[in-house]
Image (cartoon, rainbow, N blue to C red):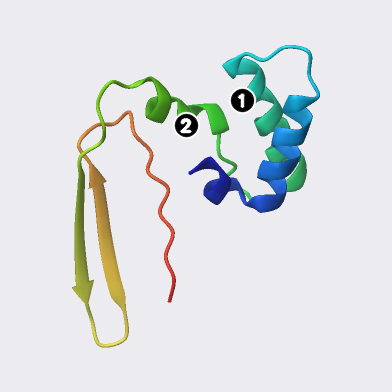
């Protein structure tokens, strides 16, 4: 999920930088990945990698998703809702 969210180049650079470190904690991984993400992207609303991924690793439950799709004449609207505020669910789509 992280790979798909940040993209191939950022993910690979982050993994390579992390593997070169002498320490190997989860916080070290998030710090390296955030640093690579911040240096490689110009998004106005940058994601916080640790905040995005920690619930997926630390929560004992999984999110309950409610998805509804409404078709219009020239558009499709998809509603995605989680049962908890702790979860951010990256959403991708293909046309």
The image shows residue 93, relative to residue 90, as above or below, that is below
Q: Are marks 2 and 1 in contact (CB under 8 Å)?
A: yes
Say what secondary structure mark 2 lies in.
Answer: helix
Rounded to the nearest whole Å, what is the CA distance between mark 2 and mark 1? 9 Å
Residue 66 visible here? yes
Q: How many marks?
A: 2
Q: Earlier in the sequence, mark 2 or mark 1?
A: 1
Residue 54: x %, y % from top left: 45, 25
Instruction: Identify residue for label 1.
Output: 30
- The residue at the point 71 percent across, 35 percent down is 14
Say what secondary structure mark 1 lies in.
Answer: helix
Residue 41 visible here? no
Quadrant occupied by the C terminus: bottom left
- The residue at the point 76 percent across, 34 percent down is 16
Figure quadrant of residue 67: bottom left
Residue 4: x %, y % from top left: 54, 50
Residue 22: x %, y % from top left: 78, 13
- The residue at the point 42 percent across, 25 percent down is 57
As drawn, the label of residue 53 is: 2
Residue 71: x %, y % from top left: 22, 78
Image position of 58 (left or right of 11): left
């Amino acid at each position: 999920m992280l790979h798909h969210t940040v993209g191939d180049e950022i993910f690979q650079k982050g993994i390579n930088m992390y593997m070169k470190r002498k320490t190997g904690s989860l916080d070290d991984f998030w710090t390296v990945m955030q640093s690579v993400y911040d240096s490689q992207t110009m998004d106005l609303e940058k994601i916080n990698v640790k905040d995005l991924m920690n619930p997926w690793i630390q929560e004992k439950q999984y999110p309950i998703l409610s998805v509804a799709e409404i078709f219009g004449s020239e558009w499709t609207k998809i509603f995605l809702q989680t049962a908890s505020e702790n979860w951010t669910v990256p959403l991708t789509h293909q046309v």
